Structures are given as C-alpha cells and as structure tokens.
Image: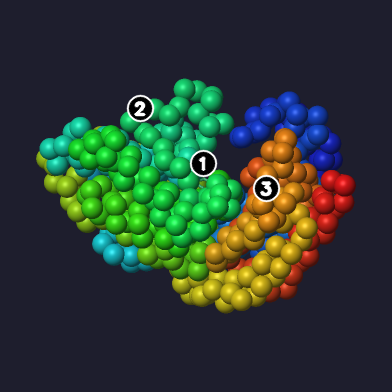
C-alpha cells in the first residue's frame, strides 16, 4: 500500500478519507460526494490546506488552539515527556510529576477555593465525571435523593451519554435515547431570538427565575446541581443579559444547590479573564475544563472542584469509583502545563483584552450595519452575528432555518476564512494570539462573505 502522506494528491486523500474515516457530527455520504478539505499545516492563526491555500482560522480549530498553531516549545515538551515517562496511571496510589504540577498550576489560576483537579481526556468526559461527583457528594452528605441536575435547552456539554444529556440539543437527544434520567432543562437566556417584546434585563431575570420554578416543581430536596456555560458556545455564542448570572447565583445560593460552570470554551483566557466565571461574577463549586487547557495540543480535560465538595468525597471512607485510563496522562499534562506557562509568560490574557476592546469590538459591531446582520455580540475573543431578513423585528428566515447560515459559512470557506454557523448565527473564536492586522483580514473576509451571501439571496 502507498504510504499516505501530505504529498498525495488531494483527490486521493479525499477518497481514502471517505472510504475509511467516519467524521463526527457529519453526514458522511454527503461529505464523501464533496470531499473533505484536507488541512496540512498550521502556524499562528493560519492553516494551510492540501491545495496550498492559506486559510485564516476564525475558530481556533474547535475553540481550542488558544495560543495558536505550530509552537515548537510545546512539541519539545511532548517529546521530552514521552521519552522520560510516556504513560503511567494515577489510580492505585501512584502519581507523577506532570499531573501534580499541572493540578497545582490550575489551582493557582482558578478563582476562590477551586483547589482540586480530577482529570479526564475531554470536556465530555469531564462532564460525565461531574454527574458522578455531584451525586456522590450528596450521597455522602446523607441526601442520596438529590440526583437531579438542571441544565438549559440549547446548551452544549459534550456528546457522550452524560455530556449529551446535560446538553440541551434536541438533535443529539434524537439519536440514542438521551437525555438519561434525572437531567432536566430550562429555557436559555437568548434574548435576541426568544426575548419577544421584553426588555433585555427583564428577560434575563425571567429566564434565570425559571431555575427557581423548576427547583420548586421538582422539590429542593431532589435537586443536586445546576450546570451552565458562562456564554453558550456551540449554541451560537449566546451572551446572556447582564441580569442573568447574578440571579442564577442567588437562586443556587438560596437553595444550596451546587453550581457547575462549564468553562470548556470560556476557560483559559477566551473572555479576557482566565475564566468566564470571573467575567460574569459566577462562583461555581465545580468548573469543567478542556480545550484551551492544552490549547488543543494534547487531549486533556478535567473538573476543578472546590474544597468542600472535594473534602466531602475524599473523606467519605470509601473510594470514588470513577476514572479514565488517561486521567492525568503525563504527556498531555506536561503539554498543558507548558501551555499555561506560555500564556502567563506571554501575557496572553492581557493580549485578549487589548485586541478585543476596542479594536475587534469596533470592527465587529460595525457588522451589525450589514443588511443581513441583526445583532453582533462579542465578549473577549468570542463573537457572533445573527443573520436576519428583518433586523427591527429580530426575525428569523421563514423556512429552512440554518440554510442562510450554512450558505454564509460556505462563502467564508471559499474565501479562506473559517467561521462556523449555528443555524443562522455565525460565530468566531480565533486563537487568542491574533493580531490587529489579522483581525482586519478576518473581518474583511467575513464582510465579503456576507456580501456574497446577501447577493445570492436576492
Ligand atoms: N462543554 C462545552 C461547553 C463545550 O463547548 C464542549 C465542546 O465543544 C464540551 C463540553 C465537550 O468537550 P469535548 O468535545 O472535549 O468532549
């Protein structure tokens, strides 16, 4: 068999891809007809494809390559760790330096008393861990009936049975019998799409108070936790009204239920602070982390756990019967630690604030003047625009919801810009190292793509 390398012609790579590789979240037969775009290299915010095209990656891969592609220092750390200790587990009373050092660094960066890390291989796995953690916590506390976790419709918390159940995406639930029992969903704080005639702040309060109603309906003695992304990412970069999180916090405090902030996207600088919880004033008991933890250079995720939850479980007198072969994988941990050190040394969180406000903010908000764009939202380096046939009415396209977004995404792709669409919302989350000049390229290409998409609608 021919060795499969970057040197094979694109068509051959596409045929092999179609023959043997089943893609996530993809209708494979449709992709096979079209052929996947084959990405061969990355440097900074730029990707190269097998045809030699230079693409600006407005999504940092899947919101994860926070420090940008192609860092040699991370590759060197990985190689060194592979030679020194490629693998060892942390199950049976052993530990190793990379897992210890990374946990200590995460505890240093995380706010409040979030001092303990349970490792997973991904965000989905970490959220599965969270289900186990909160139920175990209440069980040890002598309240085993507190098992219900409340989440939001259109949330994304991963695609395992647990993560997909915590998430509120009906497309995921429709395949495989999700959600699993005792996970319930309230409405999302999506003012532009669902706020009707309400003032944005009132709407934020109303949506947060659905949590209180739900707790009362289920019974406070049954509710274990509430989980939410500070900003819904995969749901369309939905920035909640300013009133939303303070009210959610008040309700969680009032009923003494655990608050889980899913920081898989918003963690590690994305919103202009180390964590989105800091941007929104949330005080979670548990945070879910992944993606930016290693800038996507190695698969790693985890749960950061506050002192009280940790101590309750740790002193229960029994094992916590949960773990993954790759929990705290030495190579992934060493890479993640180096990534966080680079972020600190190169002041990348400060850079996010510098380029996002006012530079990107001004350019991004101008997109709202485009005839196809309703609202333009941005927090740090996480932004979205809503495509609409009627701005004043905040209307949606009547039929084929998502089709215009898809077409716009296709125009972006053709113009060598990666932007994602969620229905008729277009979103960006570039690497946090993006420069003002690269922001210009990104926004210029987005504008051209919007123009082309708009012209195609007439
Ligand atoms: N939680 C959030 C908020 C996410 O955005 C994602 C992935 O996009 C996940 C969890 C799942 O993470 P993973 O894909 O690493 O399993």
- Disc 3 secondary structure class: loop
Q: Residues within 10 Å of mark 3 (few under 14, many from 20)?
A: some
Residue extending farthest top: 177
Numbered circle sitting on residue 166: none
> Residue 134: x, y in percent?
27, 42
Q: Earlier in the sequence, mark 2 or mark 1?
A: 1
Identified at 45% across, 27% down, the residue is: 178
- Disc 2 secondary structure class: loop
Numbered circle sitting on residue 181: 2
Question: Alpha carbon of mark 2 to alpha carbon of mark 1: how far?
Answer: 18 Å
Q: Which residue is mark 1?
A: 154
> Residue 112: x, y in percent?
29, 64
Q: Residues within 10 Å of mark 2 (few under 14, many from 20)?
A: few
Identified at 18% across, 51% down, the residue is: 311
State whether residue 132 appears in this view.
no
Q: Quadrant of residue 282?
A: bottom left
Q: Is residue 439 left or right of residue 72?
A: right
Identified at 82% across, 50% down, the residue is: 453
> Residue 358: x, y in percent?
61, 76
Q: Quadrant of residue 44?
A: bottom right
**Label 2 close to label 3 by CB (< 8 Å):** no
Q: Which residue is mark 3?
A: 395
Q: Is residue 455 above or below residue 151?
A: below
Which residue is more in the foreground, 198 or 94? Answer: 198
């Amino acid at each position: 068999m021919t060795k499969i390398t970057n040197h094979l012609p694109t068509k051959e790579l596409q045929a092999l891809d179609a023959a043997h590789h089943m893609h996530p979240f993809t209708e494979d037969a449709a992709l096979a007809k079209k052929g996947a775009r084959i990405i061969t290299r990355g440097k900074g915010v730029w990707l190269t494809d097998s045809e030699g095209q230079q693409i600006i990656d407005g999504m940092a891969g899947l919101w994860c390559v926070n420090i940008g592609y192609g860092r040699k220092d991370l590759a060197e750390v990985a190689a060194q760790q592979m030679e020194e200790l490629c693998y060892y587990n942390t199950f049976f009373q052993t530990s190793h330096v990379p897992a210890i050092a990374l946990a200590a660094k995460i505890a240093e960066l995380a706010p409040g008393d979030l001092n303990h890390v349970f490792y997973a291989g991904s965000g989905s796995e970490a959220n599965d861990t969270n289900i186990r953690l909160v139920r175990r916590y209440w069980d040890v506390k002598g309240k085993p009936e507190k098992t219900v976790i409340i989440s939001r419709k259109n949330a994304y918390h991963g695609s395992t049975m647990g993560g997909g159940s915590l998430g509120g995406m009906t497309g995921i639930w429709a395949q495989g019998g999700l959600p699993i029992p005792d996970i319930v969903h309230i409405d999302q704080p999506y003012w532009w799409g669902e706020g009707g005639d309400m003032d944005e702040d009132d709407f934020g309060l109303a949506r947060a108070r659905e949590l209180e109603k739900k707790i009362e309906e289920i019974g406070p003695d049954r509710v274990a936790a509430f989980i939410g992304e500070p900003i819904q990412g995969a749901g369309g970069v939905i920035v909640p009204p300013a009133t939303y999180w303070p009210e959610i916090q008040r309700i969680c405090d009032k009923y003494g239920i655990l608050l889980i902030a899913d920081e898989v996207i918003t963690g590690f600088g994305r919103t202009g602070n180390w964590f989105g919880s800091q941007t929104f004033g949330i005080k979670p008991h548990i945070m879910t982390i992944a993606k930016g933890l290693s800038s996507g250079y190695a698969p790693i995720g985890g749960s950061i756990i506050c002192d009280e939850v940790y101590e309750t479980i740790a002193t229960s007198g029994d094992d916590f019967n949960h773990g993954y072969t790759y929990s705290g994988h030495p190579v992934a941990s060493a890479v993640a630690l180096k990534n966080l050190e680079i972020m600190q040394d190169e002041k990348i969180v400060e850079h996010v604030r510098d380029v996002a406000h006012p530079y990107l903010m001004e350019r991004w908000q101008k997109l709202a003047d485009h005839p196809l764009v309703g609202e333009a939202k941005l927090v740090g380096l996480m932004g979205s625009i809503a495509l609409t046939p009627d701005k004043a009415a905040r209307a949606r396209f009547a039929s084929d919801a998502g089709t215009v977004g898809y077409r716009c995404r296709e125009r972006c792709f053709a113009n060598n810009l990666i932007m994602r669409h969620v229905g008729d919302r277009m979103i960006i989350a570039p690497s946090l190292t993006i420069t003002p000049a690269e922001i210009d390229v990104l926004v210029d290409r987005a504008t051209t793509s919007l123009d082309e998409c708009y012209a195609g609608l007439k």
